Image (spheres, grey):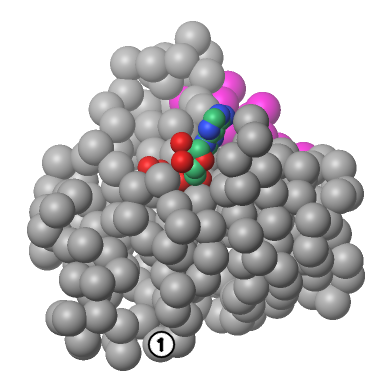
Amino acid sequence: MLDVRELSAWIGGSHILQGVTFEVAGTGVTALLGRNGVGKTSTLRAILGELPATGSVTFDGRPVLGAPTHRLVRAGLGYAPEDRCVFAGLTVAENLRLACRVPDPDYDTVYSLFPELRARSRQRAGTLSGGQQQMVAIGRLLLNPNRLLLIDEPTKGLAPKVVSEVAAVLARVAQRVPILLVEQNLAVVRRLASAAVVLAAGRVAWRGQAADLLGDAERVRTLLGVGSSRPEREPR
Ligand SMILES: Nc1ncnc2c1ncn2[C@@H]1O[C@H](COP(=O)(O)OP(=O)(O)OP(=O)(O)O)[C@@H](O)[C@H]1O
């Protein structure tokens, strides 16, 4: 579905992405992993045209690298950035409405996955908890007929119980639309991902089945340094 080849990008004189190559399948969750600062967010931003890059990116067989971001969005690439980008001063309903780009947005799906968003539709998004804001961010992606979702650290900073809720929702979302997921919580990766791509210093250090990575404690320690960054929490 998404084919990334030799993606290379510079930020302020630093060679952030140094020939990143991987594929995202048309079903399920592909996890994009790596220690802090290895270039995961930059990879998503380069794919989306938010960060100038060289190499090639094809989405459903069409070359898209260098295309304006709005064209990619119209082609069905949905993006939930790490900071969620909800409009704090607007209500939940207004945040959702602003995201609609088709005449018949899929509110049924959004409200069946997130009944709380309907209940809180008049509440200002800035007064929601982090988990509820994340649900607005994911809900916005589901209103439109997106064909691939890029989701950056959706569980970051959330309480363990909320991490579980977000993971459960993402599992249901992934049954409808494939996801490229940046995620540091390995229990969430274990629960959701079928494939994994690990970045190290701007390159792909490992790619394959998520279970093969997570089943090899030594590989996980070497590639991800687990234990030195964020503790793994098991979603229930
Ligand atoms: N706007 C920027 N200006 C300067 N350096 C940047 C900028 N954005 C990213 N970088 C640097 O690029 C490198 C890759 O950053 P990126 O955010 O892609 O990493 P990441 O793997 O997503 O990290 P994290 O897990 O901390 O979110 C880092 O060294 C970061 O400091």
For this rendering, which residue is in front, 118 or 155? 155
Query: What is the span of residues highlighted in magenta in the rendered image?
Result: 92-101
The number of discs equals 1
Please say if 1 is above or below 160. below
What residue sits right under mark 1 in the picture?
A: 209
Is 150 or 199 nearer to us in this picture? 199
Is 183 rendered above or below residue 121?
below
| Residue 22 % position (x, y) | 61, 75
Whether 202 is among the magenta residues is no
Left or right of 166 in this view: 227:
left
Q: Residue at x 67, y 43 (%)?
A: 10
Could you tell me residue 58's position as x and y percent? Answer: 80, 69
- Classify residue 23 by image quadrant: bottom right
Q: Looking at the image, which residue sits at the far top?
A: 89
Q: Nearer the viewer, residue 108 or 191?
A: 191
Q: Is residue 171 above or below residue 41?
A: below
Tell me if residue 19 can be seen.
yes
**Residue at screen point 70% across, 56% down:** 8
What main secondary structure does the magenta stretch of the protein show?
helix
Kind of residue sitting beneath label 1? Gln
Judge from the rendering whether residue 103 lies leftward or rightward of residue 43; answer left or right: right
SS for dot 1:
strand
Across and down, in percent, residue 201 comes to 46, 57
Q: Is 99 inside the magenta-drawn segment?
A: yes
Q: Position of residue 144 (x, y in %)?
A: 68, 50
